[in-house]
């Protein structure tokens, strides 16, 4: 039963998983699409109407543009009169407090004002007169109203208008009709002196001193205060009552003829028709018909992706993780685009769609990256207000993103790419405005802000690449450069344990990298693979020639089969060490394939020479494989064998180097070591030439420096 299940899984797992991933993606995107009908016409302000004459199919209102509504809202806010409320009880409280304070003041300070009471009046009648005048004036001030302005209106002019709530009534007032605390105090003091009708200068002086001592400012409090809640409610009601429409179009009325230029006013009418049309479709047409149409359209686009992978990228087609990766990043872009239907003023051009081609290009290739970018943009265009303009801008931006970030080996490369993308957005948008409007007066300055924000958000590609690496087991150039750093713990250990092998790995990396550049392979991957391909030799370093010193060779005391086994074991030892240090699978592939299924030729030939009558067990002398299955692993196999063999040359003439390279690679080809690798005969010949030139440069003859001859006495 288990065997049957295992066979079923091995045969059907990938096809079923592949189909389920595509169906799930189609279903999610269909769910995210706006469930309204799609207006059949594309149009742009300043361009000719390319369709047949448009006649209103039904009555519909002409909706104001967002700019018009914003202007009316701003005007309403500007003309809105704030609401203040009068406290009608405060006057009585203040007068009662003043009366009590006044009597206590007289009792305590009667002797201080003895001259005022004894010379000009009986103390009781004169003080009572002053008290009565103050109370009457306080009553009048509070009846008129003492206002406290909020901070934003502190410098309001006398003509400032407000609404005053008095109990159940609301009346309009100007600020000039009310008093503020400073003016109220001045008026109170001046009214007291005026009502006393004093002619004598001495009495005026004494009375003023008495009034100052009363500290009447303590009894001047605002009884009119700002009512924030009522003001907000009235302003909200005012905005709510703003009409969303500015006219009406009747059924059968001509809107625009074919070839006629779309003006701002005409565009507003067509926008209103589209808005009403899509609303009517959503309410009157069967919801399931819309859903079916969207599903079929998205299914068609994703079928195109499926067929593209099947015919042009079969390696990705056979990798479930790679399919999951490209579908996931596509879904993420569509999810971000769908936010446009949930937020009225969502800045659509702030979404960094260029992240998709950059990330796919980083892990896979440019052709697939551009294809997926186009498909994603076509899907996201359903969320854009102007689909044509959106597609026209985004496709060139995707191309620029791939060109400007061909290889991401430094963080500065991302910044440079972001700057190019911002510039591309700005130039294309400006060109479209010039084409459509014939002037720059209607340029939306906020669009350039959105483009700048888009470029800043593009910097998220750096952490996103790291996340996708961990999720799907990919390798970016940045990670490969980090792995190839000689300060990596494994390489530091290798440099100490096997210094000869370490130097050999560096030289192999140099050779292989040059060939990778020539053959359009991944030079960063080849170099990283070269640095780790022989780490298994750390288990027994002295059994390898490059690490032997002083003529000591431990193989001298061993049988050839045993020596071959020790040498071959450096493959398995390397894999175990790589897994222990969590090295990526792509690096481990270099460890397992760099010897392919070749023989340990030294021990195999030595065995035959020593025992000519015996038939050797070939498997004992043969590496387990597999043979190289990528262009990069094939390049490393050549470089490894050539670099090791070049150390045994007795003379480094051009002819000897040419013969060595030809011999090594021809033997590997005869043994079918490259049969599974996507490398052509032409590329192998090009690799030979690179190896020859590189070795000649390394081992070129150097001039002999003469010694200084001693002078004869």
Image: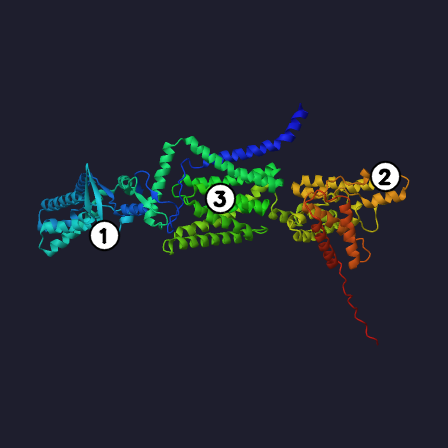
Q: Circle 1: is it few (<14), some (14-19), or many (20+) Cα within 10 Å?
A: few
Looking at the image, is mark 3 or mark 2 nearer the viewer?
Answer: 3
Mark 3 secondary-structure assignment: helix
The residue at 42%/35% (across/down) is 35
* Residues at marks 3 and 1, CA–CA distance in whole angstroms: 55 Å
Q: Nearer the viewer, residue 319 or 513?
A: 319
Which tag, 1 or 2, sits closer to the chain's start? 1
| Quarter of the C terminus within the rendering | bottom right
- Marks 1 and 3: in contact by CB < 8 Å? no
- Residue 283 lies, with reference to residue 109, above or below; the image says above
Where is residue 276 drawn, in percent x and y? Answer: 34, 38
Which residue is identified by label 1?
Answer: 157
Q: Nearer the viewer, residue 65 or 262?
A: 262
The residue at 62%/30% (across/down) is 12
* Residues at marks 3 and 2, CA–CA distance in whole angstroms: 63 Å
The residue at 37%/52% (across/down) is 46
Q: Circle 3: is it few (<14), some (14-19), or many (20+) Cα within 10 Å?
A: many
Q: Circle 2: is it few (<14), some (14-19), or many (20+) Cα within 10 Å?
A: some
Is 453 positioned to the left or the right of 595 in the image?
A: left
Which residue is identified by label 2?
Answer: 616
Which tag, 3 or 2, sits closer to the chain's start? 3
Mark 2 secondary-structure assignment: loop
Using the image, tell me which numbered label, if any, was put on residue 295: none
Q: Nearer the viewer, residue 243 or 280?
A: 280
Residue ranking furthest to the top: 1
- Marks 2 and 1: in contact by CB < 8 Å? no
| Quarter of the N terminus within the rendering | top right
The residue at 79%/68% (across/down) is 707
Can residue 652 be seen from the camera position used here? Answer: no
Which residue is identified by label 3?
Answer: 377
């Amino acid at each position: 039963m288990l065997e049957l299940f295992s066979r079923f899984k091995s045969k059907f797992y990938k096809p079923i998983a592949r189909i389920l991933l595509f169906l799930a993606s189609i279903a999610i995107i269909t769910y995210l699409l706006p469930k309204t009908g799609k207006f059949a016409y594309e149009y742009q302000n300043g361009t000719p109407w390319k369709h047949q004459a448009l006649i209103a199919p039904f009555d519909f209102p002409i909706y104001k543009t967002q700019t018009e509504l914003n202007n009316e809202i701003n005007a309403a806010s500007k003309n809105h009169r704030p609401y203040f409320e009068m406290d009608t009880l405060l006057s009585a409280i203040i007068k009662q407090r003043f009366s009590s304070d006044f009597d206590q003041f007289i009792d305590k300070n009667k002797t201080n004002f003895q001259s005022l009471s004894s010379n000009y009046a009986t103390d009781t009648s004169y003080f009572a007169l002053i008290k009565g005048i103050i109370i009457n004036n306080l009553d009048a001030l509070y009846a008129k109203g003492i206002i406290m302005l909020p901070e934003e209106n502190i410098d309001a002019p006398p003509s400032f208008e407000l609404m005053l709530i008095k109990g159940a009534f609301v009346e309009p007032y100007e600020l000039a009709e009310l008093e503020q605390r400073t003016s109220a105090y001045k008026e109170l003091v001046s009214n007291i002196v005026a009502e006393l009708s004093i002619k004598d200068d001495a009495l005026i002086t004494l009375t003023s001193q008495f009034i100052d001592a009363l500290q009447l400012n303590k009894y001047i409090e605002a009884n009119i205060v700002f009512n924030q809640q009522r003001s907000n409610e009235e302003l909200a009601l005012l905005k709510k009552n703003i009409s969303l429409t500015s006219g009406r179009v009747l059924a059968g009325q001509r809107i625009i003829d074919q070839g006629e230029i779309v003006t701002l006013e005409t565009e507003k009418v067509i926008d209103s028709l589209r808005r009403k049309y899509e609303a009517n479709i959503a309410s009157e047409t069967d919801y399931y018909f819309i859903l079916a149409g969207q599903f079929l359209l998205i299914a068609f686009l994703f079928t195109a992706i499926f067929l593209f992978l099947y015919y042009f990228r079969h390696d990705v087609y056979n990798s479930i993780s790679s399919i999951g990766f490209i579908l996931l990043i596509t879904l993420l872009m569509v999810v971000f685009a769908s936010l446009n239907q949930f937020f009225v003023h969502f800045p659509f051009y702030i979404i960094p769609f260029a992240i998709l081609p950059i990330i796919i290009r980083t892990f896979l290739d440019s052709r697939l990256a551009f294809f997926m970018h186009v498909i994603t943009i076509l899907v996201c265009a359903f969320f854009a207000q102007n689909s044509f303009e959106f597609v026209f801008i985004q496709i060139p931006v995707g191309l620029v993103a791939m060109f400007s970030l061909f290889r991401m080996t430094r963080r500065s490369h991302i910044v440079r790419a972001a700057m190019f993308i911002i510039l591309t957005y700005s130039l294309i948008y400006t060109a479209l405005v010039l084409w459509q409007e014939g002037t720059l007066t209607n340029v939306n300055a906020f669009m350039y802000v959105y483009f700048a924000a888009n470029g800043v958000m593009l910097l998220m590609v750096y952490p996103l690449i790291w996340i996708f690496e961990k999720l799907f087991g990919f390798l970016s150039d940045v990670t490969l450069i980090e792995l190839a750093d000689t300060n990596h713990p494994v390489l530091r250990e290798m440099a100490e344990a096997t210094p000869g092998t370490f130097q050999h790995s560096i030289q192999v990396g140099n050779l292989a990298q040059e060939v990778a550049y020539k053959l359009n392979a991944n030079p960063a991957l080849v170099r990283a693979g070269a640095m780790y391909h022989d780490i298994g030799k750390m288990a027994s370093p002295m059994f390898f020639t490059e690490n032997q010193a002083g003529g000591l060779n431990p193989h001298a005391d061993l049988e050839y089969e045993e020596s071959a086994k020790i040498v071959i074991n450096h493959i398995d030892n390397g894999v175990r060490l790589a897994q222990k240090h969590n090295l990526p699978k792509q690096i481990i592939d270099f460890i397992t394939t760099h010897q392919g299924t070749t023989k340990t030729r030294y021990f195999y030939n030595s065995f035959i020479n020593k025992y000519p009558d015996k038939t050797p067990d070939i498997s004992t002398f043969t590496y387990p494989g597999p043979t190289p299955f990528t262009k990069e692993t094939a390049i490393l196999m050549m470089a490894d064998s050539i670099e090791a063999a070049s150390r045994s040359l007795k003379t480094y003439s051009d002819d000897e180097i040419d013969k060595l390279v030809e011999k090594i690679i021809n033997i590997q080809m005869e043994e079918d070591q490259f049969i599974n690798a996507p490398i052509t005969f032409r590329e192998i010949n090009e690799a030979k030439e690179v190896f020859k030139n590189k070795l000649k440069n390394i081992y070129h003859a150097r001039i002999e420096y003469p010694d200084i001859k001693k002078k004869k006495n």
